[in-house]
Amino acid sequence: MTLLHHRLLTEQWPVLRRLISPYIREVWEDAFPELLRTAPADTTAA
């Protein structure tokens, strides 16, 4: 049984990553390095 649709997750990750906490985002991006390639650069750092 598949719970995650890989293509859908990678397509929606730029939006989803803004809705979750930084800690959860870091865990997911560590587990799925391909998400880092779909995510825009973090522009919140000063």
Image (tube, rainbow, N blue to C red):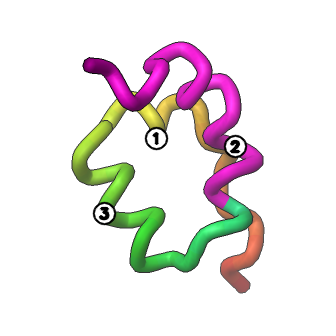
* 20, 22: nearer the viewer: 20
> In the image, 25: left or right of 41?
left
The quadrant where residue 44 appears = bottom right
> In the image, 26: left or right of 20?
left
Q: Position of residue 38 (x, y in %)?
A: 58, 31
Q: Which residues are magenta?
A: 1-17
Q: Which residue is mark 1?
A: 36
* 44, 19: nearer the viewer: 19
In the depicted structure, whether residue 29 falls above or below residue 2: below
User: What's the residue at 26%, 19% (across, down)?
Assistant: 1
The quadrant where residue 14 appears = top right
Q: Which residue is mark 3?
A: 27
**Outermost top residue:** 7
Q: Is label 1 in a helix, a strand or a loop?
A: helix
User: What's the residue at 72%, 85% (across, down)?
Assistant: 46
Residue type at mark 2 is: Pro
Label 1, label 2: how far apart the Cα atoms are: 9 Å
User: What's the residue at 37%, 50% (across, down)?
Assistant: 29
Q: Which residue is mark 2?
A: 14
